Image (cartoon, coloured by chain):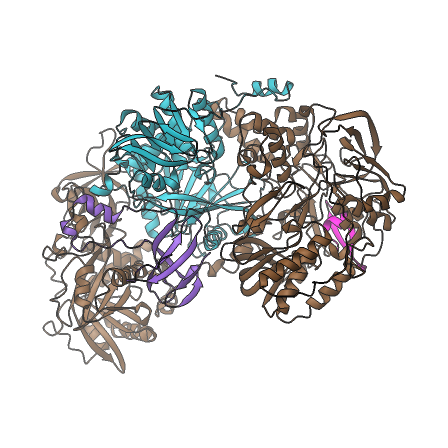
Chain colours: A cyan, B brown, C purple
Amino acid sequence: MKNKYSIFSLIKNAFSYHENWEKAWKDPVPKKEYEIVIIGGGGHGLATAYYLAKKHNIKNIAVVEKGWIGGGNTGRNTTIIRSNYLWDASAGLYDHSLKIWESLSQELNYNVMFSQRGVMNLAHNLQDVRDLKRRTHANRLNGIDAVYLSTEEVKKFCPIINTSPDIRYPVLGGTLQKRAGTARHDAVAWGYARGADEMGVDIIQNCEVKGIKRNGNIIEGLETTKGFIKTKKIGVAAAGHSSVIANMAGLKLPLESKPLQALVSEPIKPIIDTVIMSNAVHAYVSQSDKGELVIGAGTDDYISYTQKGSHDIIEGTLNAILELYPIFSRMRMLRQWGGIVDICPDASPIISKTSINGLYFNCGWGTGGFKATPGSGDLFAHTIANDEPHKLNAAFNLNRFVSGDLVDEHGAAAVAH
Amino acid sequence: MSKNLRINSSKYIDQTNRISFIFNGKKYYGYKGDTLASSLLANDLHLVGRSFKYHRPRGIMTAGSEEPNAIVQLHKNTSRTEPNVRATEIEIYDGLEASSQNCWPSVNFDIGGINNLLSPILPAGFYYKTFMWPASFWKNYEYFIRKSAGLGKSPTKADPDIYEHKYIHCDVLVIGSGISGIMAAKTAAKNKLKTLLIEEKPNLGGSTIYQNSEYFKINNQTSSSWLEKEINEVKKIENLEIKTRTSVAASYGYNFLLARENLTDHLPIEHRKNKARHRLLKIRAKKVIFATGSIERPLIFDNNDRPGILLSSAIKRYADFFGVACGEKNILFTNNDTVYETAISLIQKGINIEAIIDNREEPDSKLLYEVEKNNIKIFKGYTIIDTSGYKRINKISIMQLSKDGQNVVGSKISLSCDCLGISGGWTPAVHLFTQSGGKLKFREEDEVFIPNIAPSNQLSVGACNGDLSLDEILINTQNSLKKFFNIKNTDYDNLEKLSSTNKSKRNIWLLPSDKVLGKTKSFVDYQNDATAKDIKLALREGFRSIEHVKRYTTTGMGTDQGKLGNMHALGIISETTGTKMGELGTTTFRPPYTPLTFGTIVGRNVGEYFDIFRKTPIHDWHVEHKAEFENVGQWKRAWYYPKKNENMYQAIQRESKAARDSAGILDASTLGKIDIQGTDASEFLNRVYTNAWSKLAVGKCRYGLMLNEDGMVYDDGVTTRLEENRYIMTTTTGGAANVIGKLEDYLQTEWPELDVYLTSVTDHFATVSVCGPNSKKIVSEVIPNLDLSDESFPHMSFKNAKIGKINCRVMRISFTGELSYEINVQANYGKSVWEKCMEAGKDFNITPYGTETMHLLRAEKGFIIVGQDTDATMTPIDLQMDWIVSKKKYDFIGKRSLYRSDTIRDDRKQLVGLLTENPNEVLEEGAQIVADINKSPIEMLGHVTSSYYSPNLKKSIALGVVRGGKNMMGQKLIIPMEKKNINVTVADPVFLDKENKRLNA
Amino acid sequence: MFVINCPYCGEREQSEFKAGGEAHIVRPKQPTELSDDEWAEYLFMRKNIKGIQFERWNHIHGCRKWFNMIRDTSNDEIKAVYKMGDEPPKI
């Protein structure tokens, strides 16, 4: 491996004042033709290219990215990683991903800081309790490490939560998945980019797709701001912009793109050692290694590509945060931002072939795509390489919207962070 | 004993009002009007904190909200503690207690300082390259990384302060009260526009208000005295509101802005009681004028971060405004004229200046000549190459710059000092402008980004518009205002002005040194310890975009959000990569401009005001009778009524038994009620429910099931035909708002031809439900004139009646399977009717029961609860309720979806009853159901949706959904729990009175 | 946050409104005669346009009327509002 990263390479490079580090990835001019072109240089797109090269031995691949890699939802999410999903299909998909996370730093030789600090989901009403218990039982039988916690156990695991029975929506219990946690979002994109680049994948930034060329039902290539690129297979991992690409190919998808906001506080010394999610009062919080409280807000209900949402959403989220963590009242919001999330009617993703030969979509992750990055990349690569889904993503096809065989995860996560 | 560097009586500092405060455990004094920073400087104290990564000693750098270094923890270990407060912003008050952060054991001796020694192996992004082995060790590494990161400490107690919100609608909002802001506000207000002027500092006037210099004049007065008169006039204008100590945090589209008005942070703690601390202003302005000024740039050279190094404008502000000398041996270092303004101020006040380093070779400036007259040595064409002094600067080294500015030449000169003022020119504060969608352009001559295309109804004036000299400000501001307001004149059309600034600047983003870059520490982001070589490393490793460099090096991600250093980062990238600055663009300026307290954003929406509390008209009775409550949506519903020493289980067993044995009473007021009127009301119901409604007779009730268009069960309830063209629909408690929303949607957008009107009447009625074999006797006593005979008033029918003078609607409907009457009365009579029923039922042991017993009773009867037994994946066929799906009706909401390839499958999950092998064992709701425990992977067939011990059947009963369950009657299945497997048998979901004898009793 | 000009009430804060997705998707008059594909097209498939979008809004905390809006989803600029059933104005 080029320029292997380790404490020894850091020390060695210190002697030359770090003047000799190589580029983590090149900045190539696009070739005339590729075997496969991935649209979207976020975590999902880069991981797809990485696994296509690594597991399917396809080397002539380009990833085209409108802006800079990792600049979309990869760099804008609250980095929650978990696999405690209700339905078998979802559990299979997300746990596949979680297993890859567990050794991803070593595989990529890039520290993605996967921190298995646990994810706790809170119940605030009796139906929440039933739903979380149902999910915990399903998780256990699916081999996923989830346990149900009483209110006292919740308090013990995270003492700063206000578990008083007198609050408006008291904490009635919760679930805990200990293998779950967070990771450093940028590092995931960068690590996959570095790995893919090393295997010969061309990562082409500042390259916006302007059109999809097809001959009847067959893909011929794509128009970009850097010229026409010939290819027979296109994998789209464009998140919020999936419909924009689909429209270029004359397809409609069951998606709506909406603003999702998040915010961080100023950095403080460690105060929360886990990730806490509460659907009912809508508060998601963890603390980054830098010390910032990372807080996920909700989506607005209108379609927008502005990466901005309304202040009411931020206010509602912080209302909930102070309901559950009154001690944070004097903490300060340092930065807020928005992303564009593509949401499916059943709150489950699409990793699927389409009615056009050679056109594949990986989309519909809504608010929860980050956690799936490695697994989704792996399965999407499989689907593109074999023109057939892997059994783990078979359920996440486009046809489910026709047949009615939806994977409805609404019950499990109103907002599936 | 520390020195006193207070130099004169500034009119902004009240020297008769001495204030004591504690810093790092030691008592100091300052005066009213001081900030913590100015009073520390007056005490000759520069070392305030430690940096984020290397724990380097840091001092006060600025005099404003852009401060990266001097951030402190206030009132540690108290409920009012607050981390990361800028010493430059906090006004001192008696009893103020502040301490340094991110250092242990003390700011003077910080163990974390070891990181500075390790810095050669801690370049930007080092953590991505290491801590990977052994794989399981990241947790341990992370523990230490997290501990050394972070700055201050979170409070650990609830906040004693309160916060509030205020909406403001104005014609014109002016942000910033420097010279251009005052001109804008006065012009707006004089043109009869309702104007709001916001200033983040406690006083108006920006930096002009202390520009008391012969070199800057307006109408033959110093600019400060001219502005002071203007301010005095502005304060008298009626339609102009002024808010000081108010910081605009965010500027959103459609001229919606958020500002934080600081009400008590400058008061002693004991004066804050019962006062709101901050007020969040939610401003909707017709026009917005940004007069947000500019921020001085530092210079980037080796060791440019030592305590004692300040921006030159800060030194001027401390001298002019606060009457404080920042040092006794001052040196100034510049690439432009700004430091000469500072020098003139210092000379005026008798503060010693050792030397001035100007990197320009032949600066030609009136101000410079004035300074030279005072025998101050000016090193022209020189740069600082290094500084020394660990906890306070004590020496600088300078060398001459090469012609091209890329190298240093000649020999090194050392100069000693105790304070260094630096100026790299100015950066217009365009943050708020861009937040709301304004587009910037790059002005090459002085390398600044300035507003280019403004969203409609927005204007930038003064320094934030790139007007950096007094004459430009005066001319351009009045011209812009005329255009913006479409007016002919302003008060400022014919001002005489004297401005002495020479605009020449020799901009070198990264100043050269005699050392290789790798050996230097030239800080670009002070708080996050991002250096010039870090930025170069990022570029070398292939990070090109400014956002990449920012994220990789953490430049601009501190609590100051890069207000000082972001431009230099861009400049260094531009120089290194050969990309023009204008093409690089800036990083996105994200709200808030300065950090905003959570409590401020939340305002009064805390505690009991977090969410609306909906109570039924009978709520007080439930409270008086010691009910436990359950949250259902926003409603508080009585859950059960424990008697003395009774636990929940016992209470429910008692309540359930009483309801079947004699009489029970339930408050059903929370169920949604929709009044449906119009000639097409029946047709409307035909379309929204799965069953047929046209033939329902007046006075009859019918149960209906409503689907989503995707065929899944959405809501249910009983609807009664009150009159030919009038129905009252009931919905689930939680679904009420959504149901009427959905019905209105269809009515208005799909079926506007229907003559139907919907009104939500949920809150208008109280509903008292009396059930049980003795319910008829009780109701007949409460409503003696009502004929309750089965012939006249059978099950599923309705009658109007009167209780005394009170009109009521009585429905004979049942959710328990018992004979049951629902009495609906106007809400305010609810409690008295409830009490009448209790009184009438006394002899029958009438027992109030809550939602839990209701759930148990209906489960005995096999009635579903939408949302508990269904989960948005269940069709009516799945619920084995085929009988309610009309085959004849042409269409209803969701009908088409029932015939899709997946929804017609026979092996979908279907609702069944479950009986445990051991009748005393109660299943857990949510438990999964399997057929074969040994299969791997285990196949889950469904789950338990409802489960109770039935006191009436004397056994455990449960409802569940099971794949293919419809055809599994009598089959044995397994509930695999964590520690055991429970055997169950699939049964009919109707456990009790399948023949409906009780209903019709 | 937008200011929306409700065709019935005039200018109001966005928080009074609820968005209802793409406009002019008419519910099929004869759903039973549609194929599964055609029904799915109506039920789920959306243009999800980046740019000028015709969409539905409801003044839910006001007059409760549904109406149509033309908005540029790339910058959230509202171009026009019009009542249900009216022809979209030219923009």
Q: Quadrant of residue B622?
A: bottom left
The residue located at (28%, 55%) in the rendering is C24
Whole-percent x, y for residue C72 in the image: 40, 51
State whether residue B224 appears in this view: yes
The answer to whether residue A115 is above or below residue B796 is above
Q: Is residue B434 left or right of residue B695?
A: right
Whole-percent x, y for residue B18 in the image: 79, 57
Q: Which of the two residues, B486 or A387, is positioned nearer the viewer here?
A: B486
Q: Where does the C terminus of chain B fall, quadrant-wise?
A: bottom left
Q: Where does the N terminus of chain B fall, quadrant-wise?
A: top right
* Range shown magenta: B12-40
Q: Is residue B660 left or right of residue B463?
A: left
The answer to whether residue B413 is above or below residue B683 is above
Whole-percent x, y for residue A250 in the image: 29, 40
Count of numbered circles in the view: 0
C64 within the magenta span: no
Q: Quadrant of residue B513?
A: top right
Q: Which of the two residues, A115 or B292, is positioned nearer the viewer here?
A: B292
Whole-percent x, y for residue B86 in the image: 67, 47
Q: Is residue A356 left or right of residue A370?
A: left
Q: Which of the two residues, B458 or B931, is positioned nearer the viewer here?
A: B458
State whether residue B846 appears in this view: no
B32 within the magenta span: yes
Q: Is residue B48 left or right of residue A168?
A: right
